[in-house]
């Protein structure tokens, strides 16, 4: 998607070797065609894995890659941490959760932007048991993508993001839904505030 492909693009430009995997082969082909990575080989031995999948899939994907690549540092990029942290107790030394505070109204690998994370906050939330070298790997990825790294506590992260990110999305979507009842020319009466409020609903 947008986040994973944008990380691949930014990391490639920072000089990292990037392999990509996706259940959608077209997404992999899109990233590869842009030169932002290569398909993950069967004998891959990655140093760092960034899991960028829909929130509901994060726990199972994280569990899978932790088992398949026992030497790798693993981070997830999802915006809600409670669920994924509950399934990583056995790998707290090498799992470092994180969340880049960036996005777009566009979606999919084709919308990737190598500067999406530039000057944006990238929250890093390691377990206390995480090795310093593992934390440093995730923070280096964030910095190489142009982000500003901040350490945070997962529970506080979820509470803050609910208000600063998810609630605006919900309000924008509700407002956009209310527009369906207007006459066809009703939009002519709107100002820039409506456009700003409904951008995320797109």
Image (cartoon, helix red, strand yellow):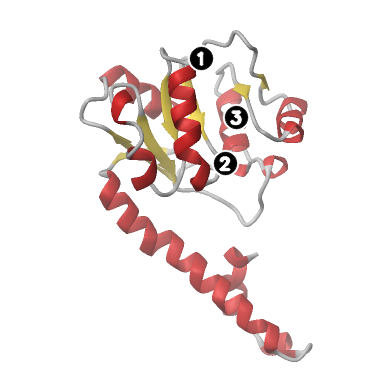
Measured from the top left, where is residue 171 in percent x and y?
50, 73
Measured from the top left, where is residue 2 in percent x and y?
62, 43
Query: How many marks on residues?
Result: 3
Relative to 113, say whether 133 is above or below: above
What kind of element bears circle 2? Answer: helix
Q: Nearer the viewer, residue 175 or 104?
A: 175
Residue 67: quadrant of the picture:
top left
Q: Quadrant of the N terminus?
A: top right
Name of the residue lying farthest toward the left = 128
Q: Which residue is mark 1?
A: 46
Q: Which residue is mark 3?
A: 8
Name of the residue lying farthest toward the top = 43
Tag 3 near tag 1, CB within 8 Å: no
> Which mark identifies residue 3?
2
Q: Nearer the viewer, residue 176 or 17?
A: 176
Viewer-side label of 2, 1: 1
Any part of residue 146 in sight: no
Tag 2 near tag 3, CB within 8 Å: no
């Amino acid at each position: 998607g947008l986040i994973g492909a944008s990380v691949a693009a930014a990391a490639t430009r920072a000089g990292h070797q990037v392999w990509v995997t996706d259940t959608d082969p077209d997404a992999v082909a899109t990233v590869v065609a842009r030169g932002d990575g290569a398909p993950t080989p069967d004998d891959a031995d990655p140093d760092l894995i960034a899991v960028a999948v829909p929130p509901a899939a994060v726990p199972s994907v994280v569990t899978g890659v932790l088992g398949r690549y026992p030497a790798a540092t693993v981070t997830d990029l999802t915006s809600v941490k409670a669920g994924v942290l509950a399934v990583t107790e056995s790998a707290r030394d090498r799992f470092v959760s994180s969340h880049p505070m960036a996005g777009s109204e566009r979606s999919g690998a084709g919308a990737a932007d190598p500067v999406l994370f530039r000057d944006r906050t990238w929250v890093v939330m390691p377990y206390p048991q995480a090795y310093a070298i593992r934390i440093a790997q995730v923070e280096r990825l964030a910095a190489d993508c142009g982000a500003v790294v901040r350490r945070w506590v997962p529970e506080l992260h979820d509470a803050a993001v609910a208000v600063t990110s998810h609630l605006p999305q919900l309000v924008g979507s509700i407002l956009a839904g209310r527009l369906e009842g207007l006459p066809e020319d009703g939009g002519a009466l709107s100002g820039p505030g409506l456009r700003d409020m409904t951008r995320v609903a797109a």
